[in-house]
Amino acid sequence: MTHHILNVNPQKGTIGHKIYSFLSLNSTNDVAAELARSDALHGTMVIAKIQTQGRGRGKNVWYSDWGGLYISIVLKPALSREQILPLSLVIANSVAKAIAAVTKIEIKTKWVNDLMIEQPLRKLGGILLETEGVSEPPDFFIAGIGINVNQTQFPTDEPITSLRLITQRKISRWQLVIIISQELEKDYQLFVKSNFLPFREEYKRRCLLLNRFISIIVGDNQYKGEVIDIDEKGRLVLLTSDKQIEKFAFGHILLEKDVP
Ligand code: BTN
């Protein structure tokens, strides 16, 4: 797999200080994990024009043709799996800010970490935060970011879209990489110091689930109710149909109209 090495920030150990840029690979998350295992520093990034085995959350495939932006970042915080959970909300928020800065489009998030646009509601991107092994804290985390940038068609009729389809213009993937790296560097530093609290209000403003009726699937269980809050740990707070308050750190969301 041939690649170039680039950077968007000269300072070692910052996000984007070293970027491995590929034409095609299996999954940027897998290549970033390989690099992390062989001692790549915190902040090392992998980007690709095509992924042959792009993954989404759960067992989903992530369509990874030409035109999309596929990024993975090696993160090496001294944080446990539990402490890191809200970081995927923070990353979704940082990426939403960066896309809005480049395109002027209002980006929403669908908890946990889907990037969405409204009217009509379509998915634009997502975050996949992964780790491996059993040690606690883990040796590294990999933050995968997928954004539909310049694609004009998708091999599915799921409700997804791209920045190009919305703006009717070609968007610079490289400009997005630069702004995303800057936003993430700033937000990551603050997260390590203060966790989710400083991001909570902004996340809530962007989150399109607040005050909506949803269904959440966690393992074999399904809960229905109204989303009344995102708490200080980034958990979704649900007022269930039988008037109980339940908090979820993860789960798969169905909006009311999709609930069977
Ligand atoms: C989701 O919404 O399900 C998360 C999608 C994450 C996709 C990105 S693309 C870059 C990185 N490499 C992968 O294989 N997946 C993530």
Image: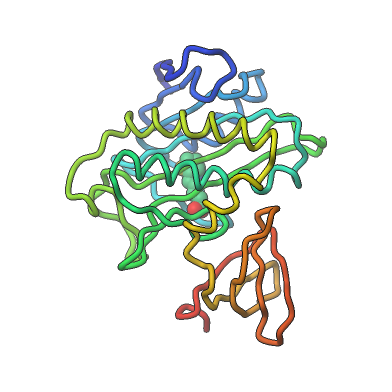
User: In the rendered picture of this protein, how many numbered marks are placed on residues?
Assistant: 0
Q: Residue at x 60, y 36 (%)?
A: 142
Compared with residue 174, is residue 196 higher up or lower down, i.e. above or below? below
Compared with residue 257, is residue 129 higher up or lower down, i.e. above or below? above
201, 23: nearer the viewer: 201
Q: Residue at x 31, y 68 (%)?
A: 120
188, 56: nearer the viewer: 188
Image quadrant in which the N terminus is located: top left
Q: How is the image coloured?
A: rainbow
Outermost residue on the bottom side: it is: 242
Residue 53 in sight here: no
Compared with residue 185, is residue 195 higher up or lower down, i.e. above or below? below
Residue 249 spot, x, y in % from top left: 69, 58
Residue 178 spot, x, y in % from top left: 39, 27
Residue 103 spot, x, y in % from top left: 28, 43
Indicate the quadrant where residue 238 lies.
bottom right
* Residue 123 horizontal side relative to residue 217, left or right: left
Indicate the quadrant where residue 204 lies.
bottom right
Residue 112 spot, x, y in % from top left: 57, 56
Residue 172 in sight here: yes
Q: Residue at x 82, y 37 (%)?
A: 136
21, 112: nearer the viewer: 112
Q: Residue at x 41, y 57 (%)?
A: 116
